[in-house]
Image (cartoon, rainbow, N blue to C red):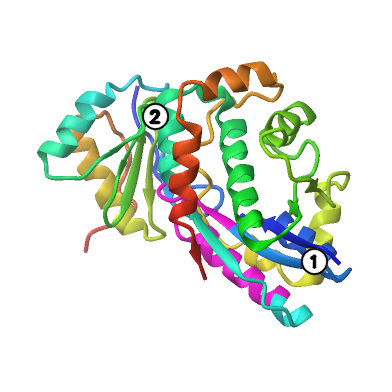
Amino acid sequence: MAKGVVLMSGGIDSPVAADMLLSRGHELVAVHMDNRPFTDDSPLEKVRDHLDVLRARYGVTLPLYVLPHGSTQVTLMRNTDRHVGCVLCRRFMWRSAEKVAEREGATFLLTGEALGQVASQTLSNMRSATVAVKMPIVRPLVGFDKHEIEERARALGTYGISTRPGLCCQAVPDRPATRTRLVQILGEEQKIDVDRMLDDVVRHAVLQ
Amino acid sequence: MSYRSLKLCSNGGAFEAIPEPKLRLDLAKVRAAAESSGRAVVDARVMLILPGEPEVTVTRDGKIVVKTHDAGVADRAFRELVRLFDLPSEVPPLVRER
């Protein structure tokens, strides 16, 4: 069985994706990108509770890395085109998760993304984000609709945690781009120091 | 143009006030006003974040988000900002003072 890094947001989808891989015997390490001050404390609290559910279900340790993402958001907002902000944000999340995977000896990345659910999850945006990393990305929910995912989350016992009150990401632009071109994304990243920002994020990762 | 309501946002994590129609705030002036009152400011160019209890976000189009579940706390913070930034508001009090 393989070892992977799962991106956990506190939402409905990621614990369901993690459950599907854990049920097949794969080992997982969780990463949460801490979006404060663009959110509140609730996403991290939800992730901790999701992991408790999964640990109890499978008897695994499932360590959690919390990586600061707020300063990255500030830099993106100050220097790049707001309309493609979600894709740029996503690329940083993937890169950060890949760094953790390298540290942990993991060989794949895992996400609860489902096609068409939000602005960053259109096919073109997924592609623009995915090519930021070399490691394979597993998306077990990609063809599921929202209802199917919610049913699985209810059965797992994580739905009630995900739907507790919480602040939506304040960094999401009013009209996020749904069809980005990679050349445009790479152009935006020329305006910032990606390597330095990534080093800074990974250096401040906290294992919980 | 004015704020007409301060209400719990859809996910229930904060109170928000959205002006109708949207404003075009000069965030540099808003930032200066906030700093002159002794508040710390995180400047993300298209929005300002004012850390504290409660933490507040002000966007360029005038949206104000107060990060609290407490209507009274949100109301007081909103009114303080309206006064500080000289913003138009017709929001009735959320909590009646006894």
Q: Is residue A141 left or right of residue A70?
A: right
Mark 1–mark 2 contact, CB under 8 Å?
A: no
| Residue A12 visible from this viewpoint | no
Label 2 chain ID? B
User: What residue do we see at 72% from left, 79% from top?
Assistant: A60
Residue B25 image label:
none
Mark 2 lies on residue: B19
Residue A128 vs residue A100, the one in the foreground = A100
Residue B91 appears at what percent x and percent y?
A: 33, 39
Picture quadrant where residue A89 is located:
top right
- Which quarter of the rendering shows the N terminus of chain A? bottom right
Q: Residues within 10 Å of mark 1 (few under 14, many from 20)?
A: many
Q: Is residue A186 above or below residue A131?
A: above
Q: Measuring 35% from the left and 27% from the top, which residue is drawn there? A: B45
Q: Position of residue A189 (x, y in %)?
A: 53, 25
Q: Amino acid at mark 2?
A: Pro
Instruction: Give the secondary structure at mark 2.
Output: loop
Give the quarter of the image for residue A116. Answer: top right
Residue A19 got which mark?
A: 1
Foreground pick, A107 / A173: A107
Circle nearer the viewer, 1 or 2? 1
At a point 23% along the width and 59% down the height, the residue shown is B97
Q: x, y (%) of residue A205? A: 48, 58
Query: What segment carries the magenta color?
Result: A32-54
Distance between the alpha carbons at the discs numbered 1 and 2: 43 Å
Query: Hey, what amino acid is under mark 1?
Result: Asp
